[in-house]
Image: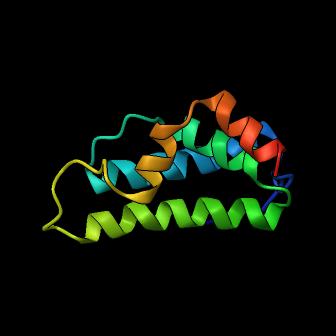
Amino acid sequence: MDVTGQDSDWRSPAFRQKLVSQIDEAIRKAGVAHNKSSKDMESHVFLKAKTREEYLSLVARLIIHFRDIRNNVARRNQCADCFFCIFFTRFSQSELRTAIVSR
């Protein structure tokens, strides 16, 4: 995950868009249907992270999750029962913000 260079401010739109693109690519390569967009997933991770390191770690875990799915060719083409899918579908964006702020 290349995140160096002039867009190193992790809160900048350009930096965040790079990671959205990487999440999107991982989802596409995994070949799974998902009801949340890569932008929604990145936004959730961004709201949860307090530091650049935490943000990058969460994004990396998300990308690895989809790479693992891709590598598991026996897995069905729907990913509705995994942790990330349950987490992203069970809560609305406002509920996620409330949960994050109140922790």
Q: Position of residue 79 (x, y in %)?
A: 29, 51
Camera-side residue: 43 or 88? 88
Identify the residue at horizontal 76%, vertical 65% (top origin). 54
The mark total stands at: 0
Q: Is residue 12 left or right of residue 17?
A: right
Identify the residue at horizontal 76%, vertical 46% (top origin). 100
Q: Is residue 30 left or right of residue 94?
A: left
Q: Quadrant of residue 16?
A: top right
Q: Quick check: can you spot residue 50? A: yes
Q: Is residue 91 above or below residue 15?
A: above
Q: Position of residue 10 (x, y in %)?
A: 81, 52
Q: Position of residue 82 (x, y in %)?
A: 36, 57
Q: Is residue 101 left or right of residue 60?
A: right
Q: Quadrant of residue 49?
A: bottom right
Identify the residue at horizontal 67%, vertical 68% (top origin). 57
Identify the residue at horizontal 35%, vertical 40% (top origin). 34
Give the colour scheme shown.
rainbow
Q: Is residue 61 above or below residue 7?
A: below
Q: Quick check: can you spot residue 15? A: no
Q: Is residue 40 left or right of residue 78?
A: right
Where is the N terminus found, in terms of image quarters? Answer: bottom right
